[in-house]
Image (cartoon, rainbow, N blue to C red):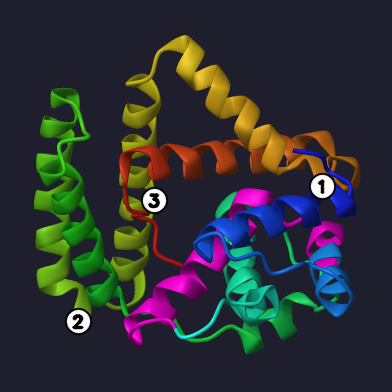
């Protein structure tokens, strides 16, 4: 896929057509300006598609669709997924807001006990789905046992004990990603590495080499989780 706004808009138009069961909704006029803005912000194509998917999932839950979806309806979901992607790979906001402003506008996330419960459910689902190899079993058993113990007491943990728990979650998250990485062949890992770098292509010239390297590692970790349907254990 091309990286120019026209190419990006054409690919988004094609994707929207497929989501609309072949009904073509042109990305022209104001819609073209909207989607071109996504390209200018550096929103990766797959991230934009995930935002479109999120809108369609919510639309389907409301009942049978009555009319084709226009790309403009998907804007909020695309930007939400882009924000989630940026946080996952470690890229700061490009919308001009300061750190304090971004933090103030960010909605409150789930509590630590709720986070642990979701992580456990996703680990169980990933294993039950059969996608994970046997090499994951021992690690998932150990991680699940630790998370169960943490969930039992997380509601009342404060201060230093809470910080230790958060550090342990980050450590377990790193271990899970390393196991996922080790489960791939060199060619599979190289392909994911190229995909991670491709997602970040529009940001490369704006970032110092070490910052880009960290972002690429974050993008690779996200793709590994996506491949194996693994949760993010780290809690922020």
Q: Is residue 10 above or below residue 178?
A: below
- What residue would you read off at disc 1? 203
Asked if labels 2 and 1 touch by Cβ distance under 8 angstroms, the answer is: no
Residue at the top extreme, as displayed: 186
Q: Nearer the viewer, mark 3 or mark 1?
A: 1
Q: Disc 3, disc 2: CB below 8 Å? A: no
Q: Residue 124: where, in percent of width, then height?
A: 13, 51
The image shows residue 89, relative to residue 64, as above or below, that is above
Question: Quadrant where the N terminus lies?
Answer: top right
Question: Callout 3: few (<14), some (14-19), or many (20+) C-alpha neighbours within 10 Å?
Answer: some
Indicate which label's residue lies in the foreground, 1 or 2. Answer: 1
Q: Secondary structure at mark 3?
A: helix
The vertical placement of 30 against 185, above or below, is: below
> Could you say which is closer to the camera, residue 112 or residue 205?
205
Asked if residue 192 shows in the view, the reply is: yes
In space, the residues marked 3 and 1 are separated at their CA atoms by: 26 Å
Residue matched to label 3 = 170
Q: Residue at x 40, y 26 (%)?
A: 181
Q: Which residues are magenta?
A: 37-65
As for residue 92 lying within the magenta part, the answer is: no
- Residue at 56% from the left image edge and 18% from the top image edge: 190
- Label 3 or label 2, whichever comes before in sequence order: 2
Instruction: Report whether 116 appears left or right of 90.
Output: left
Q: Earlier in the sequence, mark 3 or mark 1?
A: 3
Q: Main secondary structure of the magenta part?
A: helix
Q: Point out residue 87 in the picture as x, y percentages from the top left corner.
A: 59, 60
The residue nearer to you, when weighing 195 against 117, is 195
Q: Please give the residue where the numbered disc 2 appears in the rendered image.
A: 156
Q: Residue 64 appears in which quarter of the rendering? A: bottom left
Q: Give me the residue at 62% from left, 36% from top.
A: 196
Q: Does 103 appear above or below 57?
A: below
């Amino acid at each position: 896929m091309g990286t120019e706004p026209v190419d990006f808009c054409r690919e988004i138009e094609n994707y929207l057509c497929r989501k609309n069961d072949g009904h073509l909704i042109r990305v022209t006029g104001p819609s073209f300006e909207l989607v071109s803005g996504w390209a200018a912000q550096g929103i990766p194509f797959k991230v934009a598609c995930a935002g479109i998917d999120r809108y369609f999932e919510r639309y389907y839950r409301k009942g049978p669709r009555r009319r084709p979806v226009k790309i403009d309806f998907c804007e909020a979901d695309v930007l939400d997924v882009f924000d989630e992607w940026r946080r996952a790979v470690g890229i700061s906001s490009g919308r001009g807001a300061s750190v304090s402003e971004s933090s103030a506008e960010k909605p409150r996330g789930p509590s630590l006990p709720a986070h642990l419960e979701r992580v456990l459910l996703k680990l169980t689902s990933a294993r039950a789905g059969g996608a994970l190899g046997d090499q994951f079993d021992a690690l998932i058993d150990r991680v699940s046992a630790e998370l169960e113990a943490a969930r039992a007491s997380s509601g009342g943990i404060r201060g230093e004990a809470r910080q230790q728990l958060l550090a342990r979650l980050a450590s377990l998250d790193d271990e899970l990603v390393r196991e996922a990485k080790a489960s791939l062949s060199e060619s599979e890992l190289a392909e994911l590495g190229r995909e991670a770098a491709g997602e970040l292509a529009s940001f490369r010239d704006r970032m110092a080499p070490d910052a880009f390297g960290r972002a690429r590692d974050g993008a690779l970790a996200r793709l590994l989780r996506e491949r194996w349907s693994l949760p993010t254990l780290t809690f922020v």
